[in-house]
Image (cartoon, rainbow, N blue to C red):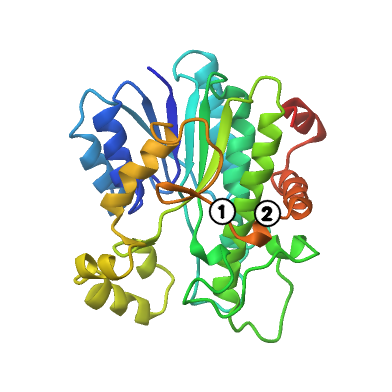
Amino acid sequence: MAGSVIITAANGSLAIPAVVHLLKTLPDHLAILTVRNASDKDPNTAALRAEISRFPQAKTVIHELDLSKLSAVRDFTKTVARNIDNGAYPRVKAIICNAFHWNLTSPEPILTSDGFEQSFQINHIAHATLVLRLLDHFDPAGARIVTLSTDAHWPGRNPLEKKAPEIPDNVDALATPPVESDYTGRPFQRYANSKLAAVMWTHALNRRLLAHSTLSKVNAVAMEPGSLTDSRALRTNTPSTLWYLQRFILQPFQPILCYINPTMRSVTEVGPVLMDLALQKSHPGERGHFDFRTKSDSSPASMDEKKQDLIWEKTLEWAGLTKGEIDALGL
């Protein structure tokens, strides 16, 4: 097996076509597919298994992983590390941090059992924990970490924005938002902030990987896939207006809309591009931010190295890494 490819929320709208592309083009790789519910009672997991069954020669394993529980992330990484150490799994060639959460219908923040705001934990803290706890099991000859970016991390670019994304001086407020009297615009801002933090962490990680004695050939990218007109995200924890918009405008008129706005794309278009980027079939060795297929700048705020380092240090704390574990990373 050439290497392990880990994909979170592998039964998601974007992930399934990415997985299919991997199984079709690189069946010698091991696809480690994580889902929140591994039972076929979950229709999305059943759909994933149906796609996998079309490629009997491919190597796949499905792990149950709930990113809203950091203990589950730690247990998963221990399992993967153990399987790599005993030769059952090859070393990691790519991690695609695909899992996603937002809740645009709840004005007040919802906290996980770990005490963190749910979108921020799933979109950033849990993925960072996953990556950090497996870094010493990456292929030192070359590997890539992919985070999903979004135009929401740029102030003013997303039509759902009412409050601009920002990294406050008190960075803890991202993970544990304070009680407020007015939550107008906060639900979408919480999502946007989680993505802004993830992009900043990607930049901070790259600087450290480049200086690392053995991991300098491991790189990290944040890919902005565009507006996915057929994504289930538009029907999950969203107001009914978004559901109607998708069903009656975005999906039926997608072929026309993509000519008007090229950033409107289907998941079947984006999935293979995402997988090729993750496996460095495109842009090998490059780092940083991508707008779909093209290397691009991330938002000006995301390039603030002082705040990148602040996000980096706080993420180590949020991830629950001990001083010994942090020192062992060599980052």
> What distance separates the C-alpha of mark 1 from that of mark 2?
9 Å
Residue that appears at 21% across and 69% down: 256
Q: Name the mark on residue 297.
A: 1
Amino acid type of disc 1?
A: Asp
Residue that appears at 31% across and 33% down: 22
Residue that appears at 20% across and 71% down: 253
Tell me the element at label 2: helix
The residue nearer to you, when weighing 244 against 282, is 282
Q: Reply above or below: 296 against 264.
A: above
Label 2: how many Cα within 10 Å (few below 14, some 14–19, many 20+): some
The residue nearer to you, when weighing 166 against 79, is 166
**As drawn, is 12 to the left or to the right of 325?**
left
- The quarter of the rendered structure image containing the C terminus is top right
Amino acid type of disc 2?
A: Met
Tell me the element at label 1: loop
Q: Quadrant of residue 186?
A: bottom right
Q: Reply above or below: 218 against 220.
A: above
Q: How many marks?
A: 2
**As drawn, is 108 to the left or to the right of 26?**
right
Q: Reply above or below: 89 against 109.
A: above
Q: Reply above or below: 58 against 45.
A: above
- Whether residues under marks 1 and 2 lie with C-beta atoms below 8 angstroms apart, the answer is yes
Q: Provide the residue designation for mark 2.
A: 303
- The quarter of the rendered structure image containing the N terminus is top left
Residue that appears at 77% across and 46% down: 313
* x and y, in percent, of residue 204 in the image: 69, 43
